[in-house]
Image (cartoon, rainbow, N blue to C red):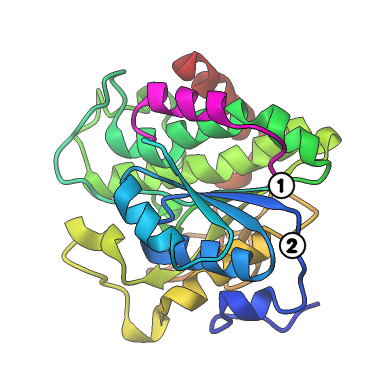
Amino acid sequence: MNSFGFTTSASEVLAGFDLTGQRALITGANSGIGVETARALAAAGAEVVLAVRNVASGKEIAATIENAQVAELELADLASVRAFVAGWDGPLDILVNNAGIMATPELTRTPEGRELQFAVNFLGHFALTTGLHAALARSGGARIVSLSSNAHLMSPPVFDDLDWVYRPYSPIGAYGDSKTATVLLAVEATRRWSSDGIVANAVNPGAIATRLQQHTGGLRTPVERRKTIEQGAATSVLAATLTTGGRYYEDCAEAPVLTGPPVMFGGGVAPFALDPGNAERLWELATALVA
């Protein structure tokens, strides 16, 4: 049992860990907690690859991190994801699906017709994760970290309207849908791939003031519930060290499964986000969408 909690930093989580010889891939690692996640993993000895849309910005960050490389990845464009996967060589030990967007004010669709938040936060990461399955399996002990949010508590998956075709568009509702999907990704990846030595867990990093809130007018969480970037990356790097999967973590601990309605700015994980039937159904639908 560790003594980590709300105020623990990423470097404190990894104190004593030696990740030398391991390769880590972090999406969206040119801002926010993605940078700190990459920095902490590299400080523990890992070779890190920053998968970013803005390569120039990524190179500036990589120059400040030892043993870091940069690769271009646009999660909203499945052709970009496929090109990234095709260019990957060798095993992959840690995959941190960190990149995300939040509450885009207008309903926006990708070239494939997907709602943008669902496409970036979940579907692009699904295509990346499944595309890199062979590389993860070659690790012999790979860990996948799937970033979620307590916004997942807003809604169970709406399988018949993943792209907001029939519902009036809700910016924060679509964000919540996408973050439920990221939890289900971890559940099903673990079920399907644990025999390959691959485990996946979902994490809620907490409330951290970053560019993520650019469409919401800034962070609205009460001050006492906010974290620094170093604290926000702590649960991500903890999940990058775990050997069991299919779970949801927050504040560096496995979150309780809620038995009643969620509390505003509270914690916990919704039962529908860990439901094996939901996870399998979403996986099958996503497989068809990225085919």
The residue positioned 63% from the left and 40% from the top of the image is 275
Q: Type of residue at label 1?
A: Asp
Examine the structure image and report whether residue 113 is included in the region drawn in magenta: no
Q: Secondary structure at mark 2?
A: loop
Residue 52 screen position, x and y as percent: 39, 46
Write down the residue under mark 1: 93
Q: Type of residue at label 2?
A: Leu
Q: Is residue 250 visible?
A: no
Residue 280 screen position, x and y as percent: 63, 28
Between disc 2 and disc 1, whose residue precedes?
2
Q: Nearer the viewer, residue 220 or 143?
A: 143
Residue 177: quarter of image: top left
Q: Nearer the viewer, residue 150 or 217?
A: 217
Q: Which residues are magenta?
A: 75-92
Examine the structure image and report whether residue 89 is included in the region drawn in magenta: yes
Number of marks drawn: 2
Neighbourhood count class around disc 2 (C-alpha, 10 Å): few under 14, some 14–19, many 20 upward: some
Neighbourhood count class around disc 1 (C-alpha, 10 Å): few under 14, some 14–19, many 20 upward: many
Residue 19's label in the rendered image is: 2
Q: Is residue 175 above or below residue 73?
A: below
